[in-house]
Amino acid sequence: MNINSVISGTGSFIPETVVDNKEFLSRDFYDENKNSLPYENEKIIEKFKAITGIESRRYLTGKLNSSDIGTIAAQNAIKDAGIDPEKIDQIIFAQNFGDIKEGSNQVDMVPSLAARVKYNLGISNPNCVAYDVMFGCPGWILGVTQADAFIKAGIAKTCLVIGSETLSRVVDPNDRDSMIYSDGAGAVIIEKQKDSSSSGILSYANQSFTKEEIYYLYYGKSYQPGNEENINYIKMFGRKIYEFALTNVPLAMKSCLDSSGEKIEDLKKIFIHQANEKMDDAIVKRFFKLYGFKDIPDKAMPMSIHYLGNSSVATVPTLYDLVLKNKLEGHELNKGDLIMFASVGAGMHVNAITYRV
């Protein structure tokens, strides 16, 4: 009988504060050379929306931090799965910037955010191991593959995998790329099941490209002229990331699907990291083209970036939670559906999972 790693519960936390594109009309935007952008903000925002698809995003305000909203997402997943938290063997927290207090830019990662979640959940069991994964935006997917490995190795039976970020607290307000980022958290419970069915994780692919790609995303100084403060912000070379992703992500997705032994015709949904609508659309089109498809099948790629923005590691689990709970119009999942998770991000890292609901 097969040992399967099955997602038995999902949860998410979406901050209440909505920040529309119009909120950026009064910003002063500069390029990497600290020169004012040669366009009016209306034109900058119009072009930004056309490329990314983002109309609004969510920011976390107040005293809550990434570990706090990760805890809330975890509580929702635990409730959804109907499990006793004391039975959790692994807490895997995907993140990149730790806890950052509102109004501060200082990261706080000691103790780990996973340990903070375990504390917040009141788990006493010392055999529940809590640790963080820093793998860029693909961190949550990597955490899921690690949970699967622990389960199939007989080390764990139940794992909690969280993806949470407060990117609004590490963006340079004078960099137009700051409009991409948002805050949020998503979580899943993954359990061991001895089952003759094919439900669960079927295959995965994880890759790291660390040659010239390594600093496509990085931590750098503000673009604001005269700003010499010793403070760094998240920065990126958007065009290089776009070209990298279009070349490498479809190949990783194909490798993942081929390893599962499943057919492309049976793939119901692709939950891809909500990074940039134009880029995601191009990636998935190229993936299907590798199998002879001219375009993406109808409703194969659910999207939340239009109103939630890019919350890094939180985008994929949040999107999955929304679709499972019928909160994304036009999309639903049924038992037995074949789906894929995929992501690309800082590192540069690429990964994918083939999963049967």
Image (cartoon, helix red, strand yellow):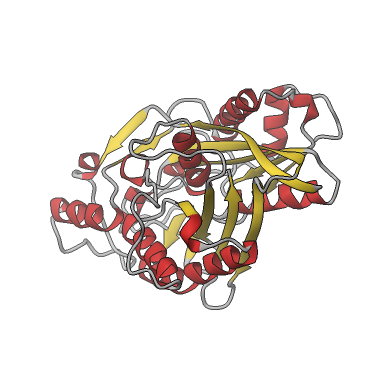
For residue 110, above or below residue 298? above
Q: Residue at x 64, y 66 (%)?
A: 259
Q: Residue at x 51, y 60 (%)?
A: 345
Dividing the picture into quadrants, the one containing residue 30 is: bottom left
Residue furthest out toward the front: 196
Is residue 215 left or right of 46 when viewed as pictured?
A: right
Dividing the picture into quadrants, the one containing residue 48 is: bottom left
Q: How many marks?
A: 0
Dividing the picture into quadrants, the one containing residue 182 is: top left
Q: Position of residue 247 (x, y in %)?
A: 45, 74
- For the residue pair 287 and 230, the one nearer the viewer reads as 287
For residue 71, above or below residue 94? above
Q: Position of residue 115 (x, y in %)?
A: 72, 35
For residue 237, above or below residue 141? below
Residue 9 makes an appearance in the image: yes
Q: Which quarter of the figure is the C terminus placed in? A: top right
For residue 146, above or below residue 75? below
Q: Position of residue 79 (x, y in %)?
A: 62, 22
Residue furthest out toward the bottom: 212
Residue 90 makes an appearance in the image: no
Is residue 101 left or right of 134 when viewed as pictured?
A: left
- For the residue pair 167 and 48, the one nearer the viewer reads as 48
Q: Position of residue 5 (x, y in %)?
A: 71, 45
